[in-house]
Amino acid sequence: MRYENSDPCSRMQLGLAIISACEERGMIPLYPDTVKEQVYRLDCGNNRVVLVYTTVVTMSAREVGTDSIKVCAVYRNSDMKDCGIGKAKHRVHRVGQVEDIVKRMLQRIDQVAETIATSECCTDCGAPKGLSKAGNLYCLEICWKPKAARNQAPPRRVNYGRRTWWRGRPR
Ligand SMILES: [Zn+2]
């Protein structure tokens, strides 16, 4: 059946289809009982997970028509920091037949799982590598640094008046 965002029945149909597809794929909901967007997790071993931001809230696809399903992968390092290690090139837009939307979501999940299974790991400690802002791959355990130095505060931002130029993003 064709997905119709303005129809509550259609949103529930898609919501239930997404949930059951994720569960059949062996994924686990991050929020067992939630009023916000449900996120499903696929464990890929070595502290790596694929996350699916489903747009599903209490069984129904969210009403915002432009919402799309996002699939990404995260590595949790030994400092309990979650680091992005990959994401689907394209979001899953909720247009077309319900079963096609679900099929595209499952394809993205497989793509991301495959990417992280074959991605480069640190030759010193085996942890996955992440991409720095400068575009270089680096070990996500920051294993070249002594443990004590890792949790140091980041360098102070220099403020000129109320604006901050640090990384060019006002916060
Ligand atoms: Zn390392």
Image: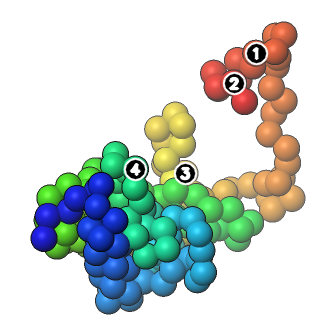
Q: Which mark is residue 37?
A: none
Q: Residue at x 72, y 30 (%)?
A: 171
Q: Which mark is residue 138?
A: 3
Amino acid tagged 4? Val
Distance between mark 4 and mark 1 Cα atoms: 33 Å
Q: Where residue 32 appears, x then y in whole percent?
A: 58, 83
Between marks 4 and 1 in the image, the one whose residue lies nearer the viewer: 4
Of the residues under marks 2 and 4, which one precedes in the sequence? 4
Q: Where residue 123 appears, x then y in whole percent?
A: 51, 65
- Per the image, the residue denoted by label 4 is 64
Amino acid tagged 1? Arg
Would you call the spot at circle 2 few (<14 residues within 10 Å), some (14-19), or many (20 or more)? few
- Per the image, the residue denoted by label 1 is 163
Amino acid tagged 2? Pro
**Can residue 107 be spotted in the picture?**
no
Q: Which mark is residue 170?
A: 2
Between marks 2 and 4 in the image, the one whose residue lies nearer the viewer: 4
Distance between mark 2 and mark 4 Cα atoms: 28 Å
Q: Is residue 158 above or below residue 154?
A: above
Left or right: residue 135 versus residue 89 is right
Amino acid tagged 3? Tyr
